[in-house]
Image: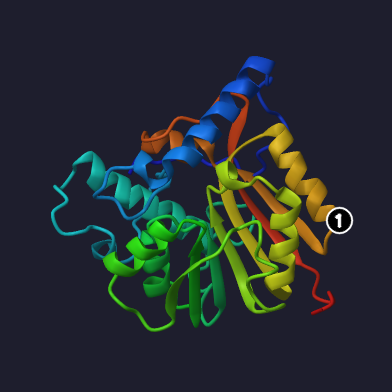
Amino acid sequence: GLPITFEVETDWRQYLPETYAVKLWSQARQWYARRLGTRRYPQELTICNSGADFGVTIPRPDLVLREGLERESPEWRMQLYGAALYWHLATTPGKDQRVTDPNILRGKDVLEVACMRGGGARFLAEVAGPQRYVAVDATEDHVEMCRRRHPPLEGLGFERADLCSLRGRFPASSFDVVLCVEPGHLLQDVQGFIDGVSHVLRPGGRLLLCDALPSDGLQSLLNCAEASDLTFDVCDDMSMAVVVAGYSSIPGGHLYLRLIASKEPTASTE
């Protein structure tokens, strides 16, 4: 990949002005994304996200380069860049994108929400060493596709669940990490999502999330977190890495952000 110079102290508050027209366009894109689901992506792909190029090599690329993908083809690159985005989110503990820890998920119970075709879940379950990795999606067809396309792996399971209704789906304090890649088009109930994440996380657990967000979308997440026992510790702009990958545009008035929130260590386990 191309080398990237990172700005460690990026000021994520400095958004481009978001006009009314831009906001309407953003809402239209979200509606379109919800309607199409995984059909937005080539059938060959099992990792469905914007992709990002951090100029580093991911572990075990053979796990994501499916048989039949032509080397250096757009689909081949999209799988690699998609896996790179997952790896970066799962191994970068703080604000400095250059400081990584490959053991963040090791031995942990992980819940991924909105897993789409499940390729990112299968990749992390293999290379990051979690004890248990539960990947969920609200669309039954996606869940069935995940079960068909991915070889069985101990500790990895695919289930149906809506990211805004986690409280009613999983026991309290049942996961150490909740991971969420590009959920924005599905976040119809932000408070419900945050409440559910807080419910399923153990005290001291973390939410790892990335997506292209407008300023009001970010503010909504922050406001909802304030009403829960979650605290956002990291809000980092990784737009450049997405742009360098070259397979997804970032809408006007948005930044592609990496967010990390932690649950209070003394929080009630309900």
Q: Residue at x 14, y 47 (%)?
A: 70
Q: Quadrant of the C terminus?
A: bottom right
Q: Position of residue 154 (x, y in %)?
A: 38, 84
Q: Is residue 264 above or below residue 67?
A: below
Residue at image coords 59%, 43%: 184
Give the percent coordinates (x, y) of residue 37.
Answer: 43, 45
Give the camera-side residue of 145 and 225: 145
Q: Secondary structure at mark 1?
A: loop
Up the image or down, 202 lies above or below 45; here it is: below
Residue sitting nearer the eye, 166 or 248? 166
Kind of residue at disc 1: Ala
* Quarter-of-image position of residue 78: top left
Q: Is residue 252 left or right of residue 121?
A: right
Image coords of residue 142 (percent x, y):
40, 58
Is 248 in front, or is 167?
167
Q: Nearer the viewer, residue 256 or 98?
A: 256
Quarter of the image holding residue 51? top left
Number of numbered labels in the structure image: 1
Q: Image height check: is 94 above or below 60? A: above
- Quarter of the figure that contains the N terminus: top left
Residue to which mark 1 is pinned:
227
Left or right: residue 242 versus residue 234 is left
